[in-house]
Image (cartoon, rainbow, N blue to C red):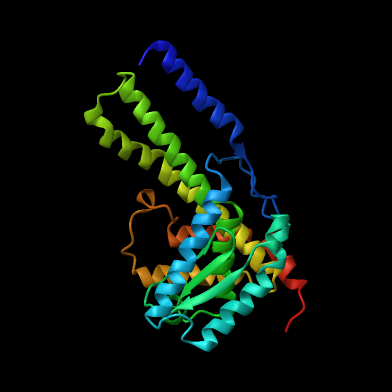
Amino acid sequence: MSKTQQSVCLGLILSCLLFACASTTEQGAVGVDRRQMLLVPNEQIIRASLAGYDQTKREASDKGVLDKNPDQVRRVQEILRRLIPPTTIFRSEAKDWPWEAHVISSPELNAYCMPGGKIIFYSGIIEKLALTDDEIAAIMGHEIAHALREHGRERMSEELIKQIGLQLLVETGTMDAKYMSAANLVTTLSVTLRHGRRQESEADEIGLELAARAGYNPRGAVSLWKKMGQASGGSGMPEFLSTHPASDRRSAELEELLPKVMPFYKGQPRN
């Protein structure tokens, strides 16, 4: 690659970085305010997510594990109904998303919200942790926050830039191709995982406020992560090698945020 071509490539990358940086949500009371790299078109993300969600439901239905427990489904869908209105505090158009929630019978301790508001809970996380409604709201608020902030789109954009950058280093002779794998690992440890932890913290903060505004006790988030820590038995991956903050650190950070969101909870009418 000639020096002129190198300059053009670098110029294109810098332009992409400059014009693709934006914040996808309002700050809310918790004050989440960070510009994000969003190169991948949102429409593509939404289409892929909807297709994936439909496929997941079909496969679960074919196996007879979709929405088997009516009580769990009722709880999850009622909590979603209450969480939707406060999403507009962070993103006004979220009220028009095609929200949907289902429960899959599985021992997994997992739940997620796909871009566009498509939610799956696994029965394992509800049953094994004996979740209260406040704790389910904490999980759901957290997962909804990922969708509001477009964290999946951000991660895809970061990965795209990383791959382009590493390839450019090889093509310009700056780095030998045989070191590509090592460079990938270094980038993952120093950039990708660090950004993942920051995204998780943002989701914790926004999720906490969503739950409080919906009338769920935000202390449920603290008790949830204590349960998660106990469930892992302390055998989890070291925090610096994980996209998720350690459970004890997570609980402590959530405790610090409680004074900001507790007034929203206290101001809500009780059922």
Percent of width and height locating residue 210: 66, 64
| Image quadrant occupied by the C terminus | bottom right
Residue shown at 40% from the left, 29% from the top: 165
Q: Where residue 52 sits in the image (x, y, percent)? A: 46, 62
253 shown above or below 137 = above
Q: Check the image and report above or below for 213 versus 12.
A: below
User: Residue at 26% across / 35% down in the picture?
Assistant: 182
Q: Quadrant of the N terminus?
A: top left
Decide if residue 216 is in sight here. no
Of all residues, the one furthest to the left in this rendering is 178
Number of marks in picture: 0
- Relative to 102, is 162 above or below? above
- Determine the image quadrant of residue 144: bottom right
> Who is closer to the viewer here, 137 or 106?
106
Q: Is 96 or 144 nearer to us in this picture?
A: 96
Residue 16: x percent and y percent?
A: 54, 30
Q: Quadrant of residue 217?
A: bottom right
Q: Is residue 77 above or below residue 17?
A: below
Would residue 154 be visible to someone looking at this image?
yes
Q: Nearer the viewer, residue 119 or 186?
A: 119
Judged from this view, the residue extending furthest toward the top is 3
Question: Residue 79 appears at what percent x and percent y?
Answer: 62, 76
Examine the image and state in which quarter residue 166 appears: top left
Residue visible at 65% across and 62% down in the picture: 97
Q: Nearer the viewer, residue 233 or 87?
A: 87
Determine whether, in the image, residue 16 is placed left or right of residue 261.
Answer: left
